[in-house]
Amino acid sequence: MSSATRSAFGRLGLVALAVMFVVAVSLANVILRGARLDLTENRLYTLAPGTGKVLGNIAEPINLYFFFSDKATADIPYLRAYADRVRDMLREFAQASGGRLRVTEIDPVPFSDEEDRATQFGLQGIRLENSPDPIFMGVAGANSVGDDEVIAFLDPTKEAFLEYDLAKLVYSLANPKRPVVGLLSSLPISAGFDPMTQQVRQPWAIVAQLRQLFDVRQLDQGAASIADDVQVLMIVHPKGLSEQTLYAVDQFILRGGRAMIFVDPWAEADPGAPDPGDPTGGMGGGRSSELPRLLGAWGVSVTADQFVGDDRYALQVVGPDQRPVRDIGLIGVPAEGLDQEDVVTAGLGLLNFGYAGAITRGEKAAATLVPLVRSSDLAAPVGTAALGFLRDPQMLREGFEPDGTRYTLAARITGKLPSAFPQGAPAGAASGGKPHLAEAAGPVNVVLVADADFLSDRLWVQTQNFFGQRLSNAFANNGDFVVNALDNLLGSSDLIGIRGRAAFTRPFTRVQELRRVAEDRFRVTEDRLKQELSDTEEKLTQLQARREDRDTMILTPEQEQELERFRDRRVEIRRELRQVQRNLDQEIETLGNWLKAINIGLVPLLISVAGIVLVLMRRPGRRGS
């Protein structure tokens, strides 16, 4: 064969390979469309088992409509990429439902019937600078009985919550009759009119989230009875409840009703108005709640004048001089502090608390106490008296000595509990024709949390106005914990596993530990400087008192010498403080360099070596065949 012929065949071979490559890529795009290999530690991009249960429990067909402005986003690649992600997820949902979930994509072109349909569902188009037309990217759903549910806008920044949001929408349509949750709260947790600002008060994010899953019914603070259709009670910061209301709660729980209770030794969300029995006039006691009559009858107590300080789990805040400082009263409990065997806390990654109390059980208590959330071993109780005048969180660390105890911040209470009213109903109580129970008819199930600020937005969620819509982005699992607990108390747990996957932020625990140790060194050195300053001032005062002359404006040589010594010492100590900070930065930078070296160099090297080993292992077999 001539060289020209070989060259022609070579060119034809290259063309054939190019054609085969193009065909293979096209076929792969079709055949493997939506296929993913999920290598994340928490399997963030694989349908959770809870999602499968939600989809498998669909009794009647559900229609989902994905409204996406395809033409209007032709020049907005990040929205189009996220739309592909939504399509893939909806396709997986439809496949896992066995045909009971029908998905339709609609492009709501301006001035079209499709745009009117999107508007009727309650979806809102947003306007971006590079798009003259409104852009729709939301999901609407309808079941066979005429109920509608919508996700008004799918925010690309909330991609980690996509599966949960879609599963929650399907769950709501598949279960149109929502359980009734009775909310009894002394805090302004629900929407209402604020007389101080003369404006409508927005509900806390937790209430907005609960209303998507439950029928939340606000109960009056002086309620003498609880309606029969209330399935679970959510009691938040109970202050000054009447005997009649306490009796109604007591009998509700003893008859098998479930409850979730939030008490607090110091509620920042409480304006501090004194309650009727508060002798302190509102300075401390007015911000506390402990529900002593009910909890005392069960043998359980929560500290009323102390909160749990934690040096390991302390959160970083901005100090009075705009420097970041750690507040031992604001603590973020990671997974290691959560009971991973309880369905309420299993899978959660971070719960934030604000000046939480400690839950304890008496020796002869009728209740069984199962801790759900505990502090670290670097914790100790701190009095709430200083919080009323606190300006610098660093002051809480003065004299703080961890005692090695892991304090319980949230717990499950079970058992056949006695009534807090052993003598019977108090005067004015409404029995509703039901007999008084001196003891629970069966084992009760109560979740107790020693912090009401746990529910406040600032500890777990950022809420912002996005083109007229209120969007919430959670940075902690507080909301997941509450919904998990209510679901569990109601006997439903399909969504729990999905919610636990929502918060995907993984803190740099090693860096946090380095910062904590450095701050301890910094504080010790700073305390030494303050002590030496105090000693110098005292010595100067003593020298001044021993002077016989009356010219107090001129320093003696001895005073000048002492003052000069202190100035030199202060410069030296400040140099030590700077060195402590430099050492911390250097340790963090060294750790970062090691991580970069491992990710950039070591991992590819290991993969390459593994590939070469596999090739060498397969070659002898080929030769012998």
Image: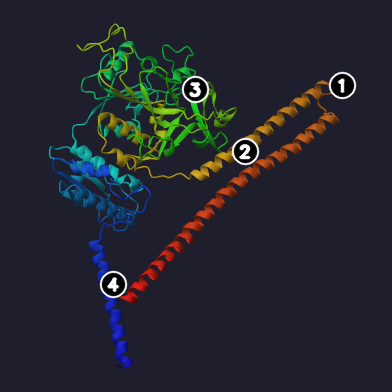
**Type of residue at label 1?**
Asp
Q: Marks 2/4: CA distance?
A: 62 Å
Q: Marks 3/1: CA distance?
A: 52 Å
Image position of 609 with respect to 398: above or below: below
- Residue matched to label 3: 306
Q: Quadrant of residue 345?
A: top left
SS for dot 2: helix
- Residue 20 is situated, as x and y percent measured from the top left of the image, at 26, 74
Q: N-terminal of the two: label 2 or label 1? A: 2
**Type of residue at label 2?**
Phe
Q: Quadrant of residue 543?
A: top right
- Residue 34 is situated, as x and y percent measured from the top left of the image, at 26, 56
Which disc number belongs to residue 549? 1
Which disc number belongs to residue 21? 4
What quarter of the picture does the C terminus occupy?
A: bottom left
Q: Are marks 2 and 1 in contact (CB under 8 Å)?
A: no
**Type of residue at label 3?**
Gln
Q: Are marks 2 and 3 in contact (CB under 8 Å)?
A: no
Q: N-terminal of the two: label 4 or label 1? A: 4
- Residue matched to label 2: 522
Q: N-terminal of the two: label 3 or label 1? A: 3
Viewer-side label of 2, 1: 2
SS for dot 3: strand
**Type of residue at label 4?**
Phe
- Which is more toward the observer, 379 or 393? 379
Q: Residue at x 41, y 64 (%)?
A: 610
